[in-house]
Image (cartoon, grey):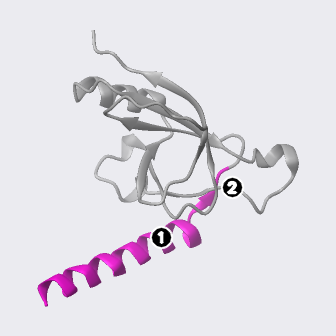
Amino acid sequence: RKFKLRHQQFVNFSMRLTEAVLVFGQKMDSFDIFYHNMDISMIFNKNKLLFFGPTSVTCKLEIAQQYQYHSDMKGLILVLADWYNNSDNGNEDNGAHYFNSAWMSDFVYEQENIFIGADSPIKLATIIKTIKP
């Protein structure tokens, strides 16, 4: 019974979060660049990413770098861009959705955005390897 209730709460929260991103969020365009921290090193065999779960990103490189440095992480900063480059091809129907959550964050300066739903691919533009001196 407790498991069903907890699962139901998770499903409801997941649906609301996905709705917030897909309905009330914005679409990426060719000017949008986002940064996502990873605390492990990985090898990517493709530069086409889909985020099925909630993924937190920032639009400020210095915030991503600061997070890596202060958390003593040795990992990667993924630089993410629009896969379709909408301003170049005129196709406004494509583009991954993101939700600007900075206004409700306790850390507004982080400029946090959320991707979820894998509605459209995101391009892995480059990878920055971080090494703490």
Q: Secondary structure at mark 2?
A: loop
| Mark 1 → mark 2, Cα distance in angstroms | 16 Å
The residue tagged 1 is 18
Q: What range of the chain is rendered magenta? A: 1-28
Q: Position of residue 28 (x, y in %)?
A: 65, 51
The location of residue 73, given as percent across then percent down, is 26, 27
Residue depicted at 27% across the width and 9% down the height? 133
- Viewer-nearest residue: 3 or 33: 3
- Measured as percent of width and height from the top left, residue 51 is found at 50, 54
Badge 1 vs badge 2, beta-carbon distance below 8 Å: no
- 1 up-or-down from 104: above or below: below
Dominant secondary structure, magenta = helix
Type of the residue with mark 2: Gly
Q: Residues within 10 Å of mark 2 (few under 14, many from 20)?
A: many
Which residue corresponds to the image point at 34% horizontal and 27% vertical from the top-left?
A: 75
Residue plotted at (31% across, 46% down) = 107
Residue depicted at x 28% and y 84%: 8
Q: Is residue 93 left or right of residue 22?
A: right
* Image quarter in which the N terminus is found: bottom left
Residue linked to disc 2? 95
Frontmost residue, 126 versus 112: 126
* Label 1 packing within 10 angstroms: few (<14), some (14-19), many (20+): many
Residue 6 magenta-highlighted:
yes
